[in-house]
Image (cartoon, helix red, strand yellow):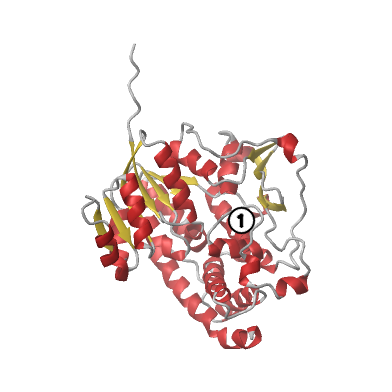
Amino acid sequence: MVTAAAPRRRVSLLGATGSVGRATVDLIERHADLFDVEAVVGGGDADALAGIAVRLGARVAVVADAAKGGALARALEGSGVEAAAGPSAVIDAASRPVDWTMAAISGAAGLSPTIAAVRRGGVIALANKECLVCAGVAFMREVARAGATLLPVDSEHNALLQALGGQGLDAVETMTLTASGGPFRSWSAERIAAARPEDALKHPTWSMGAKITIDSATLMNKGLELIEAHHLFAIGQNRFDVVVHPQSVIHGLVTFRDGAVTAGLASPDMRVPIAHTLGFPKRISTPAARLDLARIGALTFEAPDLQRFPALRLAREALAAGDGAATVLNAANEVAVALFLSRRIGFGDIPAIVAETLDRAEAIGLSRAPATVEDALALDSEARAIASERLPEAEFRAH
């Protein structure tokens, strides 16, 4: 008896040149017999995007930066891969009919393309947490309306999904996200305040893009993940917790009503959660290092220090405040992180700018609840303007 081969899955990669995108490319290349690539989308690195498109045999490659369109077209000349550029081309690529989409365009810039993919339906592997932070209620409403399947790629949320083991959420008492603690876990408050970009970019366990690495250093990343988890799993915010776990072996824990706890464990390699979504509901192999607990020897845990890392507290407060507070939080944080990376403000100014932007937005009645994705994008723009107003004073202190 001959068993029929599984049908090939047609996929698109939004954010193909970033760290998550490159990890996804690696898995697709390792399982080339399972996937056909429709579209690859990148930000501004035309040469890297062209190389990925050719290697994967993509039908179309799109660079978001319209000014890089000519460079992409030249790099793809004679390859048979269609080239396009600009924001509208990104939306068109995200809207192409596929079975599976990796949504890995970072920041609020990824919201519109991801929504375009959601509205088309299929499986959305969500690596852009800002979609749920900026527009959680509206985003999940679009997912339900389109009948799309949303699978989390963040290692923590993916671990929680797997730790659930198919149990209903009514059986869950609490969910716990783990945090590595970042590069400053053991630093004093004074030393943290004086940290430079090169210090903050030295993550002890993960290899990630610059923005998310800075968010890990402030612990804002864990705060954004709490907000994301609230929307993904639809349980109350008081049923989520965070614990610092420096080894980054346990990524998430689910405590059930009977006291039993299940945990998602894996080496700190993004190919593990990506593979879970890429093959879902089946499993595909990865080259990730297998856990050797005897060699690791000990797993340690500690409570997060909200005095040294106020960004996590700000995120919790934004989640509790509801309405548009999380949208404002994310917008202000993106502005502040970009300023820090360009050395225009100090590390301690990041949470300060976020806090002041939240206060200002509330004072002028700006923190309204976004009813639609378009509302969320408008609020995001207004919050960025408020955050930028604080720049001159911060720049003065940074120098």
Q: Amino acid at mark 1?
A: Leu
Q: Is residue 177 above or below residue 376?
A: above
Q: Residue 344 placed where, x, y %?
A: 57, 81
- Residue at 59% x, 56% y: name it: 225
Q: Is residue 296 above or below residue 217?
A: above
Q: Is residue 31 above or below residue 376?
A: above
- Comparing 238 with 229, the one in front is 229
Badge 1 element:
helix
Which quadrant of the rendered structure holds the N terminus?
A: top left
Q: Residue 368 placed where, x, y %?
A: 50, 71
| Residue situated furthest top in the rendering | 1
Crowd rating for badge 1 (residues with CA inside 10 Å; few <14, some 14–19, many 20+): many
Seen in the image, is 371 located left or right of residue 235?
left
Seen in the image, is 387 located left or right of residue 250?
left
Q: Residue 63 placed where, x, y %?
A: 33, 62
Q: Is residue 143 above or below residue 283?
A: below
Which quadrant of the rendered structure holds the C terminus?
A: bottom right
- Residue at 68% x, 65% y: name it: 313
Q: Can you see residue 126?
A: no
Give the residue number, with chain letter if any, for mark 1: 226
Quadrant in the picture for residue 226: bottom right
Seen in the image, is 65 located left or right of residue 141?
left
